[in-house]
Image: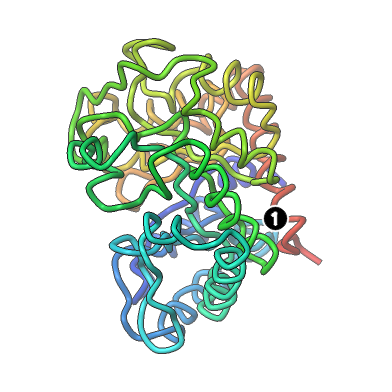
Amino acid sequence: MTLPQRVGQLFMVGTPATSADPAARRQIAELHVGNVMLTGRSYSGTAAPAQVAATMQAQTTAAATARVRLLVATDQEGGLVQVLQGPGISDIPAALQQGRLGVPRLTRAAGRWARQLREAGVNMNLAPVMDTVPGPEAARLNPPIGAFDREFGYTPLRVSRHGSAFLRGMAANGIVPVAKHFPGLGRVRANPDTSTGVVDRVTRRGDAYLRPFRAAVGAGVPFMMMSTASYARMDPGRPAAFSRFIIRTVLRGDLGFHGAVISDDLGLARQVSPWPPGARAVKFIRAGGDLVLTVSPRPLPAMYAAVLQRARNNAGFRAKVDRAALRVLKVKERRHLLAG
């Protein structure tokens, strides 16, 4: 791969699940973008998203991505966070309800949901949520997770068991699972997607609420998604996605995670709006991240240009780009997405 192609592997861009976004399609062809996310809501079953996925996959030419195919992701957690719906796709219960199922039953159910995703052209699910909310009262005050019943339960033990069951069912049936949102959004009072200054003031290194993420690592999760909240007791003033300490020392060091690190949305999230788009992407890669997610195609050209320019001008950063691209490509290799 050329350097521009390797940089392209470090990006995932959003497109509606009902139609292939022309800008996103061009970005695969012209900016070598290697991954897409199906966004919004689709109610027509598997056919429409499968057509979108096929249209995007058709852009993976030798000139664009060295014929490496795309990771096609979506948010298929269940409950209010389920992008794909309609004939042939189950109505997935919210994670809080999934947490009341027996572990073997949840694993089997997740396997069924994974097979439906494959029929829809999806090979990656941005789930399970491994955040723990301390209880029902705390959930009402927790906009990103508890307000939508996205937690598997109110203790790290239940979240560990049921989140791992979900990801195992997905992985065993051909879907790349993504554990999120490290190091946890279960104890914040605002949503980083819609607010700035979102701070977790309690989570610390070695915290019991990190145990579900450790369980996900033990279950072999290939991707970990970083939160964009900041964590006052670990790296104050810096979003976790931009924190070398949280990514390298805590996630990779303490938890022993050797897979790929994906950001939460760096395109439209209010939490990261104080930084220009290009700086967001560079800061994430420099901190040890591997795959930049932007749900909107609009900020992507500036992000891509900033990362490519920095890689051309700085040998140390170029080495980070190469390591990140290799981590993404290793996941693709296991899913038979490489050329040939």
Q: Residues within 10 Å of mark 1 (few under 14, many from 20)?
A: some
* Left or right for 12, reference 1: left
* Left or right for 60, reference 184: right
* Left or right for 284, reference 69: left
The image shows residue 281 at horizontal and vertical percentages of 43, 32
In this rendering, is residue 300 above or below 39? above
The image shows residue 8 at horizontal and vertical percentages of 56, 46
Q: Who's the residue at 64% across and 46% down the image? A: 221
Examine the image and state in which quarter residue 95 appears: bottom left
Examine the image and state in which quarter residue 274 appears: top left
Q: Nearer the viewer, residue 16 or 210?
A: 210
Name the quadrant of the C terminus.
bottom right
Q: Nearer the viewer, residue 38 or 253?
A: 253
Q: Who's the residue at 24% across and 35% down the image? A: 138
The image shows residue 142 at horizontal and vertical percentages of 23, 37
In this rendering, is residue 125 above or below 258? below
Q: Which residue is mark 1?
A: 332
Exactly how many numbered labels are in the figure?
1
* Left or right for 24, reference 69: left
In this rendering, is residue 135 above or below 245? below
Tell me, what colour scheme is on the image? rainbow
Q: Who's the residue at 55% across and 71% down the image? A: 109
The image shows residue 273 at horizontal and vertical percentages of 24, 31
Q: Who's the residue at 18% across and 36% down the image? A: 141
Q: Amino acid at mark 1?
A: Lys
Q: Secondary structure at mark 1?
A: helix
Q: Nearer the viewer, residue 173 or 323?
A: 173
